[in-house]
Amino acid sequence: MAKYEGGCSCQNCGKKADVYTDKNGLAYYKCGPCGFFPKFSNMRHSQAFLQGKVERDEPAQNTPPPEGAIPVPANTVPGPAKKKAGFFDGVLT
Ligand SMILES: [Zn+2]
């Protein structure tokens, strides 16, 4: 079963392509615009590609909850909002 891994830039034309891994965990993508269809046959190269080139679709990290998701009791005064450090703060600069 192919598994979606994320997006990468096509090595041939630079457009965005969807990257998948096959049942053996080897990465491949097919570029729609130019038809470039590289497939890794070496697990080490495949892993390096997935870790270095593929932008994974991470769930949003700092999305506030929708309005009214956390009910505040009427008889308490909420303190000053704490600024939560994002997961990637200071990691990606
Ligand atoms: Zn391409």
Image (tube, grey):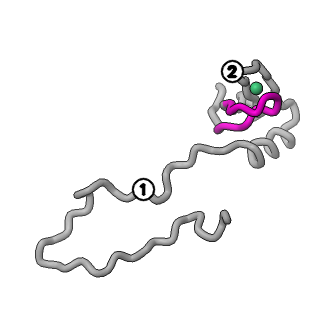
Q: Which residue is drawn at 12% across and 72% down?
A: 74
- In this view, the residue in front, 62 or 45, is 62
Which quarter of the figure has residue 30? top right
Q: Which of 4 and 81 is in front in this view?
A: 81
Q: What residue sits 63% from the left and 44% below the top?
A: 56
- Magenta segment: does it hold 53? no
Labelled pair 2, 1 in contact (Cβ < 8 Å): no
Left or right of 85, for residue 53 = right
The residue that appears at 76% across and 33% down in the rendered structure is 14
Determine the secondary structure under disc 1: loop
Q: Quadrant of residue 12?
A: top right
Vertical relation: 77 (above or below) 17: below
Q: Within the image, what quadrant is residue 32 found in?
A: top right
Q: Residue tagged by mark 2?
A: 32
Residue projecting furthest to the top: 35
User: Where is 72 relative to 44, above or below?
Assistant: below
Residue 54: x %, y % from top left: 71, 42
The crowd level at tag 1 (other Cα within 10 Å; few <14, some 14-19, many 20+) is few
* Residue type at tag 2: Gly
Q: Give the range drawn in magenta.
A: 6-17
Checking the image for residue 63, the label placed there is 1
User: Within the displayed image, which quadrant is ligand 1 positioned in?
Assistant: top right
Assign the N terminus to one quadrant of the image.
Answer: top right
Residue 12 located within the stretch drawn in magenta = yes
